[in-house]
Image (cartoon, coloured by chain):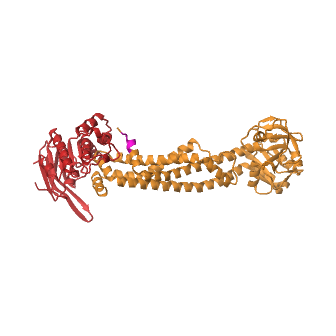
């Protein structure tokens, strides 16, 4: 059964892709919920449908069938504009490939969502620069940073609009063990601050630190 | 915090050489369009001013090509054939003729300076046609008197009342009775003498090169032309209505301009395709970035606007460079055009103005919008999920 106080709630989600003449079932009848402040790890082998499920939760894609609610509101039938606004105001994204704009400085990358919201908050950017330990790198460009630093910038950027929850797709996937550990510590701190986190990961240590794990195989929840 | 403009500029700097080449294409197209428009305006103004200076509605010349005759009358040169002076009376008696001013024009080559000197033998009634003339001194009416153009007087250091040797004429002298104020036309280099003197100097007694005719009513051009063509002397004269001449020259230039405009349009379309291709490549290379922007909350309109703005900045940089290039090379192009054109007025042939400049910038914006349509639409239609996934494959 699915509770009412959840921040994310999925019911019988299905996503089918058309690849040539063939239909590929990426997510198959998945139901789950995430409570506020919970840290959920989505695990499973490659091709299990983890990233597709994350994109459905992040309203970047439409499910073929099923229902999806975010903060109590049904999102399946929303217009593109409403989905864009929801992503901008409610969700923070962290990508495996960091997704930083190479022409912008660290501070400018962190402030990018504010620019999209037509807001200006230098204090918020400065606070997050301190929070992720990159205040001394504020005027550097992504090419001048290590992988770990780039991911910390991406996390700061995801937090700048004060989202209701954080979606992370393999946040340690491109990092060495030292940087992976640092990013894990940052996620644990965020978890302790009460932020809801949903992360797709192959990193066992990362998954272990989550409150709960959702294991997918061939698009289905197996545990 | 950076504004969108600095983000746009930073994006354009990512592929400098590619964007530079693309902007150069726009510069050529816009520069060419600007030059063609400025030429059309300059040429039209020049021809109109030249005809206005002539002050006549009709030009009566010996039988032959009317356009050659008009060109000689306007610019000054030796005439290959002559009219009999008696025709002047026929012209004067024709209804609606207000004034018929006879001219005997000859150009002499002066060995000392190596330059050509144009003489015009005229009667005082030419002042009725040249109402804009301002003369220091008096119009030459007595034998041996001269009216000289301002530039000629200046270059020779001639003064009013001075007795001078007539350039190109051996053993002939004259006294300067008047100096013409600058007219910005060919008159500034001419010497005007009484027509009897001219007929004696050049051994053409009782002959003229042309007659300048002013009508009482310019609307009666057709009647006067028909009357003159039908008279006994009609077979010996060609009557050239100057308004028709102006229209014919304009028509010839219009045809040339049409051809050049097609070339400019082709250049603009080619430039637009080049810009579109460059921006399409940029969109393709930045698919994942666009996906990330969409994921972070950029609307399709914002992505469309970003790509359109990048295209516009690229086109404006190219367009402004083209305009600067066209303005900078205007005198060079003008020199070249004067060598190519059979008839060119003394005014500036390329006359750039603010309206033409703004029109070209408008064309530049249209070109940018046209070029941006496909790439901007494509970028704005990218689904964030697909863009991030696709970008992962192309990155």
Q: Is residue A190 visible?
A: yes
Q: Which chain is orange?
A: B
What x and y, as percent, mark residue A34? 14, 45
Hey, which quadrant is residue B235 in on the image? Answer: bottom right
The N terminus of chain B: image quadrant: top left
Q: Is residue B99 visible?
A: no
Along the horizontal axis of the image, is A163 left or right of B262?
A: left
Query: Is B213 in front, or is A50?
Result: A50
Along the horizontal axis of the image, is B157 left or right of B173?
A: left
Above or below, B22 relative to B9: below
Asked whether B368 falls inside the magenta stretch, the response is no
What x and y, as percent, mark residue A95? 24, 49
Query: Is A147 in front, or is B82?
Result: A147
Hey, which quadrant is residue A133 in on the image? Answer: top left
Asked whether B3 falls inside the magenta stretch, the response is yes
Along the horizontal axis of the image, is B253 left or right of B263?
A: right
Chain A, hue in figure = red
The C terminus of chain B: image quadrant: bottom left
**The residue stretch that appears in magenta:** B2-7
What x and y, as percent, mark residue B44? 65, 47
């Amino acid at each position: 059964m699915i509770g009412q106080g959840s921040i994310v709630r999925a019911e019988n989600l299905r996503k089918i892709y058309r690849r040539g003449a063939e239909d590929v079932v990426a997510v198959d009848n998945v139901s789950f919920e995430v409570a506020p402040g919970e840290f959920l790890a989505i695990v499973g082998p490659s091709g299990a449908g983890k990233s597709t499920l994350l994109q459905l939760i992040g309203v970047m894609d439409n499910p073929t069938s099923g229902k999806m609610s975010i903060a109590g509101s049904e999102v399946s039938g929303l217009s593109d504009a409403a989905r864009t606004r929801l992503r901008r105001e409610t969700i923070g994204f962290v990508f495996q490939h960091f997704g930083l704009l190479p022409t912008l400085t660290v501070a400018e990358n962190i402030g990018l969502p504010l620019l999209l919201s037509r807001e200006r908050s230098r204090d918020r950017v400065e606070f997050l620069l301190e929070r992720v330990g990159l205040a001394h790198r504020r005027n550097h460009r992504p090419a001048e940073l290590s992988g770990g630093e780039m991911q910390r910038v991406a996390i700061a950027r995801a937090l700048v609009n004060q989202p209701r929850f954080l979606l992370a797709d393999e946040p340690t996937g491109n990092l060495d063990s030292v940087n992976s550990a640092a990013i894990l510590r940052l996620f644990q701190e965020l978890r302790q601050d009460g932020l809801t986190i949903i992360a797709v990961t192959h990193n066992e240590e990362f998954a272990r630190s989550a409150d709960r794990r959702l294991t997918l195989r061939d698009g289905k929840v197996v545990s | 915090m950076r504004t969108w403009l600095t983000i746009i500029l930073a994006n354009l700097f990512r592929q400098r050489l590619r964007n530079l080449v693309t902007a150069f294409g726009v510069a050529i197209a816009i520069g060419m369009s600007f030059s063609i428009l400025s030429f059309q305006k300059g040429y039209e103004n020049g021809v109109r001013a030249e005809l206005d200076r002539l002050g006549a509605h009709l030009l009566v010349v010996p039988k032959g090509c009317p356009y050659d005759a008009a060109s000689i009358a306007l610019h000054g040169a030796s005439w290959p054939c002559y009219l009999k002076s008696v025709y002047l009376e026929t012209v004067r008696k024709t209804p609606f003729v207000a004034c018929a001013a006879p001219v005997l024009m000859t150009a002499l080559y002066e060995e000392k300076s190596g330059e050509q000197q144009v003489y015009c033998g005229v009667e005082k009634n030419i002042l009725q046609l040249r109402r804009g003339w301002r003369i220091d001194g008096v119009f030459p009416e007595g034998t041996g008197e001269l009216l000289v153009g301002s530039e000629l007087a200046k270059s020779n250091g001639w003064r009013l009342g001075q007795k001078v040797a007539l350039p190109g004429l051996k053993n002939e002298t004259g006294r300067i009775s008047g100096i013409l104020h600058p007219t910005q036309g060919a008159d500034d280099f001419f010497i005007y003498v009484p027509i009897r003197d001219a007929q004696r100097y050049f051994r053409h007694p009782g002959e003229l090169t042309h007659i300048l005719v002013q009508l009482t009513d310019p609307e009666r051009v057709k009647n006067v032309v028909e009357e003159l063509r039908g008279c006994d002397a009609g077979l010996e004269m060609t009557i050239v209505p100057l308004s028709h001449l102006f229209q014919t020259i304009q028509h010839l230039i219009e045809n040339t301009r049409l051809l050049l405009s097609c070339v400019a349009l082709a250049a603009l379309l080619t430039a637009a395709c080049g810009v579109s291709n460059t921006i399409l490549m940029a969109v393709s290379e930045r698919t994942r970035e666009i996906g990330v922007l969409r994921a972070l909350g950029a609307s399709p309109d914002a992505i469309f606007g970003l790509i359109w703005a990048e295209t516009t900045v690229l086109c404006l940089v190219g367009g402004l460079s083209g305009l600067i290039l066209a303005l900078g090379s205007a005198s060079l192009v003008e020199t070249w055009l004067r060598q190519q054109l059979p008839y060119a007025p003394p005014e500036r042939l390329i006359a750039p103005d603010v309206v033409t400049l703004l029109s070209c910038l408008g064309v530049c914006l249209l070109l940018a919008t046209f070029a941006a349509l496909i790439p901007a639409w494509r970028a704005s239609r990218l689904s964030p999920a697909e863009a991030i996934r696709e970008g992962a494959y192309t990155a």
